[in-house]
Image (cartoon, rainbow, N blue to C red):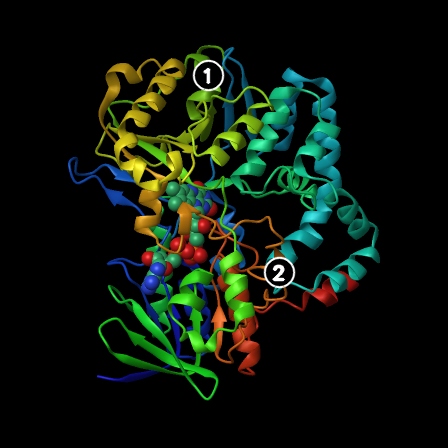
């Protein structure tokens, strides 16, 4: 059976679904093809098959500022069932000597916590926070929500305003240089670089010096989805269905069909031909889109070279230890600091900035560094994720994909490494010695098996180094969401502004596709160039 749609989207992760919902709102009939039995990609919540009622978020959990995203409102996701919690004690770094560095949703309380480590650093935090609030609000937030400008044009526009010049000057540093230049206490330096690493920015790369200041100034803190991360996927699906969108599960594309130089549809693995009147948009990675799905004759040597040189993050792959618990972890540090009983993200094993150099060395060598881990007890804030009175908790650690030179080594190493993480966890939370009902682990190899677009276990689907940012993500000059073939677009995390649950690659791709179809919509923001020119 052959069928025709206005457009076809490859992959029904959150970026694909957001694009689909916006195009559906514009009156287009759009189909998404998804290889798994459930849509959502990284928005995944699984029930433990051995222990019914215990829910685990096997990919994304900490979601930054979801409720402040434009698509959250535009697509009416609260009405479609999404609901977010933003715990006040957003992050706590527990040091080995029993202290805690705390990040609160209220900046004054974060400054007070910094003050316990260094008076000077507390003042520095306030200064950077105040200076960067307008830069985040007026420049960086809008840039992430718009197709990127060519770097020369961006630079010229930014040079016209004081805020723009300040941003350019700070960006010239690397995150490591910024932190070492501005802050003095090694634990504070380590904590700041940890956040930088959570967004997968390479701390050594110049051009990202503004990144930590922007994180400090952003009003957007970590949130979690009530009912589990997958609840956002269900809300997005409902929004897609409300505009007559269709999602076909357990369906993989075999090839993108091209006629007279234009993408005109997809042939599925089962041999079905599905035609697209206007576009095919891929949320998959560049290897899948250009090398696996296009006839090689349509891929120039130059483009093939770009794809083959596209770099995935060395430091992004995560190892996860998941627990079913009789009671939540009770940290020894809670005695002195009762507020820690309601800490959201908890970091352990990190005391000093120098540990990052060691972690990088281990990733390059494919070996396991001393554990630095972070995680949460979701059921402290949302009891619906476990049976009554019970809890779930998890810890993540950045570990190399090619363990000892080969990712296959993970299958034999996984459980032993999980036990090592649990030992460290018990050192900080002794009640875990008796409180654990069951555990399971997931390795970077499991990530790639579950979501093959996360090649090499890279959950951001492409490094932010190697020039792969903005207008040059995924390739030099290719950050426009358009490809070399008319009718073929990119809409996933390998496009600006990159991975994590931001939905912005999908949001920006929707702007571009609608513009190419000559369709206007009231949600589309004014062009970024005009906004920067008006600063
Ligand atoms: C362990 C882990 C923890 C994470 N934690 C966080 C976190 O706390 N916060 C955060 O913001 N982000 C987190 N992330 C990252 C986040 O999940 C991703 O960056 C995000 O999901 C990318 O969104 P996407 O829509 O671009 O791609 P995806 O969510 O990966 O969606 C792509 C979709 O395409 C499908 N697909 C792949 N190949 C094919 C094919 N050949 N044919 C058809 N369909 C295909 C996939 O099944 C998937 O549904 C985490 C990821 C992992 C793995």
Q: Which residue is mark 2?
A: 472
**Residue shown at 34% from the left, 51% from the top:** 231
Question: Does residue 209 sit above or below 492 in this rendering?
Answer: above
> Which of marks 2 and 1 precedes in the sequence?
1
Q: Secondary structure at mark 2?
A: helix
- Mark 2 is surrounded, within 10 Å at the Cα level, by few (under 14), some (14 to 19) or many (20 or more) other residues, namely many
Question: Does residue 424 sit above or below 232 in this rendering?
Answer: above
Q: Which mark is residue 338?
A: 1
Instruction: Quadrant for residue 428, please give it.
Output: top left
Mark 1 or 2: the one toward you: 2
Rendered location of residue 487, percent (x, y): 48, 79
Q: Secondary structure at mark 1?
A: helix
Rendered location of residue 41, percent (x, y): 35, 54
Q: Is residue 380 visible?
A: yes
Q: Is mark 1 within 8 Å of ligand 1?
A: no
Rendered location of residue 211, percent (x, y): 65, 42
């Amino acid at each position: 059976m052959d069928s025709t749609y206005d457009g076809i989207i490859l992959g029904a992760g959150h970026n694909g679904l957001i694009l689909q919902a916006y195009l559906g709102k514009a009156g287009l009939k759009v189909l998404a093809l998804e290889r798994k039995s459930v849509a959502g990609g990284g928005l995944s919540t699984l029930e433990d098959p051995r222990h019914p009622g215990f829910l685990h978020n096997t990919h994304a959990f900490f979601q930054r500022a979801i409720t402040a995203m434009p698509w959250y409102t535009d697509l009416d996701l609260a009405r479609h069932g999404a609901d977010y919690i933003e715990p006040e004690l957003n992050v706590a770094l527990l040091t080995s000597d029993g202290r805690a560095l705390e990040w609160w949703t209220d900046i004054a309380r974060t400054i007070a916590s910094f003050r316990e480590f260094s008076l000077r650093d507390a003042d520095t935090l306030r200064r950077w926070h105040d200076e960067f609030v307008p830069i985040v609000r007026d420049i960086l937030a809008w840039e992430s929500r718009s197709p990127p400008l060519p770097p020369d044009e961006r630079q010229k526009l930014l040079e016209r305003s004081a805020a723009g010049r300040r941003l350019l000057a700070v960006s010239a540093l690397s995150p490591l240089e910024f932190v070492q230049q501005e802050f003095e206490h090694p634990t504070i330096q380590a904590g700041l670089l940890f956040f930088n690493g959570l967004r997968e920015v390479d701390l050594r790369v110049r051009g990202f010096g503004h990144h930590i200041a922007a994180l400090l100034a952003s009003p957007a803190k970590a949130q979690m989805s009530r009912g589990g991360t997958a609840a956002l996927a269900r809300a997005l699906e409902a929004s897609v269905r409300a505009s007559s969108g269709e999602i076909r599960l357990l369906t993989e594309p075999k090839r993108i069909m091209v006629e007279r130089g234009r993408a005109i549809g997809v042939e599925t693995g089962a041999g079905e031909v599905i035609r697209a009147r206007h576009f095919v948009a891929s949320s998959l990675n560049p290897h899948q889109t250009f090398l696996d799905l296009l006839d090689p004759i349509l891929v120039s040597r130059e483009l093939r070279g770009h794809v083959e040189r596209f770099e995935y993050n060395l430091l992004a792959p995560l190892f996860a230890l998941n627990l079913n618990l009789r009671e939540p972890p009770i940290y020894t540090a809670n005695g002195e600091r009762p507020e820690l009983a309601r800490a959201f993200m908890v970091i352990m094993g990190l005391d000093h900035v120098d540990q990052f150099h060691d972690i990088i060395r281990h990733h390059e060598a494919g070996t396991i560094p001393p554990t630095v881990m972070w995680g949460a007890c979701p059921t402290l804030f949302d009891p619906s994720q476990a049976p009554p009175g019970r809890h779930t908790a998890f810890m993540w650690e950045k570990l190399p994909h090619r363990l000892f030179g080969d990712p296959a080594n993970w299958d034999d190493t996984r459980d032993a490494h999980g036990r090592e993480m649990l030992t460290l966890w018990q050192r900080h939370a002794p009640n875990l010695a008796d409180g654990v009902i069951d555990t399971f682990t997931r390795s970077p190899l499991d990530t790639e098996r579950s979501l093959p677009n996360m090649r090499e276990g890279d959950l951001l689907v492409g490094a932010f180094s190697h020039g792969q940012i903005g207008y040059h993500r995924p390739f030099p000059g290719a950050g426009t969401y358009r490809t070399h073939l008319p009718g073929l677009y990119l809409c996933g995390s390998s496009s600006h502004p990159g991975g994590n649950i931001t939905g912005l690659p999908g949001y920006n791709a929707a702007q571009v596709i609608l513009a190419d179809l000559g369709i206007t919509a009231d949600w589309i923001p004014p062009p970024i160039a005009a906004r920067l020119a008006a600063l």
